[in-house]
Structures are given as C-alpha cells and as structure tokens.
Amino acid sequence: MNCYQKEDLIKMVEDAKQLTQKGKVADYIPALGEADPSTLAVAIYSGERECIYAGNIDEVFTLQSISKVLTLALALMDRGADYVFQRVGMEPTGDPFNSISKLESSVPSKPLNPMINAGALAVTDMLVGNTIEDKLERLLNFIRQLTGNDRITYNPVVAQSEFETADLNRSLCYFMRQHGIVESNVEQLINLYTKHCAIEMNCNDLAKLGFVIGNEGRDPNSDQNIIPLEIARIVKTFMVTCGMYNASGEFAIKVGIPAKSGVSGGILGSVPHGVGIGIYGPALDDKGNSIGGLRLLELIAKQSNLSIF
Ligand code: GLU
C-alpha cells in the first residue's frame, strides 16, 4: 500500500460503510453503547512515512480485547513462555470470548488461550509490578513505545463503566483463583483488566503498533527491538488462530491477516514484513467483530494481495 492508493481506500470505506447499518454497537459495557454505529475509519502504515487513512480518522476508541495482544506480549517479556503457558493454553476455542464452560471441562482447569477473557485475565495477573498503578504504567509505557505516541492513556469513564458491570469476568477470576491459575485479589485484577481494556487510541496509533508487531517487534524509526522476535511470532500466531473470536477460521480464509478485534469495534492487523492496519467501526456482527471493519479488511487484503497463506 502506498500513498497513491488513498483514493482506493476512500472508495473501500464507502463500500464497507453500507454494512454498518446491519451491525449493532456493544452495550453490555454501558459506555460503549454511546458510539456512533455509522463510523468507519482505517489507517495503514508501511513504516516509511505517515499512515494513509480514510474515514473518521480523528475518533479515538478503547482497545477492549485488542489490549489482550499487548498484555500477552508484556507478560511473555516479563515471565517467559514456560511460566505463561503453564497457566494458559495455546488452543483456539469455538466458544464466545466470555464463556466459562471450557474452564470447567478442561483438565487440568486452565483457560484455552490468552485471547479469550479467562486467558486474558490470567495473563493480566502475570504482569510484573508492585501495585496496579505500576503494572498499568508499565503497560502504558510499552504501548507508548509501540505507537510512538507519548500521550496514550486509558479512558476512565469506559473503565469505570466496565468495572461496575463486569460480573461475568469476576466469576471467571473466582473460578481461576480456586484452581490456582490466578493469585491476585479479584477486585484488583478486574480493576487492572478494565483499565487496560479502556486504553484509548486512534486508527493511526493502532496501525503503527500493528506494523511493529508485523515487523518482528522492531520499530522502523528507531530500529529498536521493542518486542523480542520469538514473542512477536507467538503473538501473531495467536492473532491468526484466535484473534477474531469464534470467526477466526473464516477470517483466515477470507482475509488471511494476523488480526485482533475488540468489542469497541477496533481491529488491529499486522501483515508480517508488510503493513500495520488500524480499523475502527463500532457496529458489530453477531460474533462481536466490526461488521464494516471485516468487509474493509477483506477488500484491502484482496486488492493488495495481503493474505499470508
Ligand atoms: N473488556 C471487554 C470484556 O471483557 C473486552 C471484550 C472484547 O473486546 O472482546 O468484556
């Protein structure tokens, strides 16, 4: 993707935007219910110059489940793969992101992967730091490095809105505490989790972050390795196998890009050695993926032959 294709990108956004009428904004976190369902924006970053973009690019949105990619990378850097995968599995699940059923039926009881809520909560529990504030600040600094944006922070209104309504996530934590998978006090863990889910950015930031992950963890501007190569690979693999909820298989066939979506309507795309993609479209399909964002990624991937398969 180069700058001269901006016109094409604008056309693709117009095309995909028509689908947004068929989606629904997530409202189980009350503050997310206020998003405008007709919004659709995309930024693509190829490492050289500024992102090319189309749509309402100034809108900021919370990462929600996209933050799971970043907590996983940091926990792997903090604790190493052996420690992390003793507590969280590597296998996809056909269940919804917040399901508790496999936790009960797997022996030994451990979350199937770090991209579902149970796994992400266990990963959040692994982050190093003396207090919730320390852990959050370390995560924010990591994300500031990845995006090159020092102003990245979390949205306290969305965090509080989720904190007040996160009883299903609390139940996952209590179950895992009983089985020794998490150690923290549940309220503190939910406090940290809801704050990292509420970390905010725009599509440009998301595309830059996606580029660094696709580029094996290396920042093209400073040439610094922000994420070690093996960890960037683990993270991208989970994005392929589990990144788009229980639509990950269909997405791999139709789009073929390592990606992670969130219920805010954000989608992070990382094409290995290629481009980073940031999408925001809060109208979701029945699996929880941005309905316009999915179509847009399909069009972008086809046009530029981006599938990794
Ligand atoms: N904070 C959200 C939750 O735990 C994230 C879900 C998502 O984006 O998939 O319900």
Image: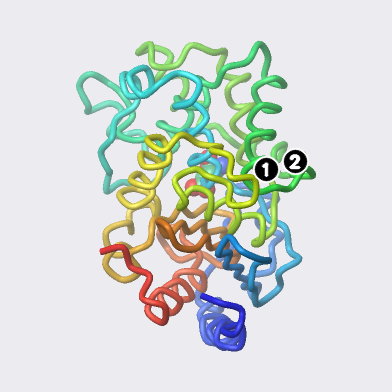
Q: Nearer the viewer, residue 218 or 231?
A: 218
Q: Where's residue 20, x and y in %?
A: 55, 76
Q: Position of residue 250 (x, y in %)?
A: 28, 64
Instruction: Kindly identify the residue that appears in the image at 37 percent across and 17 percent down.
Output: 83
Does label 1 or label 2 sit earlier along the sequence?
A: 2
- What is the x, y in percent for residue 124? 52, 26
Using the numbered discs, state the Cα–Cα distance from disc 1 to disc 2 in whole angstroms. Answer: 6 Å
Q: Residues within 10 Å of mark 2 (few under 14, many from 20)?
A: many
**Vertical order, 206 against 227 (above or below):** below
Would you say residue 171 is visible in this rendering? no
Where disc 2 sits, the SS reads loop
Instruction: Report if the CB atoms under discs 1 and 2 are less than 8 Å apart.
Output: yes
Which quarter shows the C terminus? bottom left
Q: Secondary structure at mark 1?
A: loop
Q: Pointer 2: what residue?
A: 153
Determine the image quadrant of residue 238. top left
Q: Which label belongs to residue 199?
A: 1
| Residue 9 left/right relative to 113 | right
The type of residue carrying mark 1 is Ile
Is residue 70 among what the camera can see?
yes
Q: In the image, residue 86 lies at what x, y percent?
A: 31, 19
Q: Nearer the viewer, residue 2 or 200?
A: 2
Number of other residues with Cα within 10 Å of mark 1, as a class: few under 14, some 14 to 19, many 20 or more:
many
From the viewer's perspective, tell me whether residue 216 is left or right of residue 189. Answer: left
- Tell me what residue is drawn at x 39 percent, y 47 percent: 236
How many numbered marks does the figure carry?
A: 2
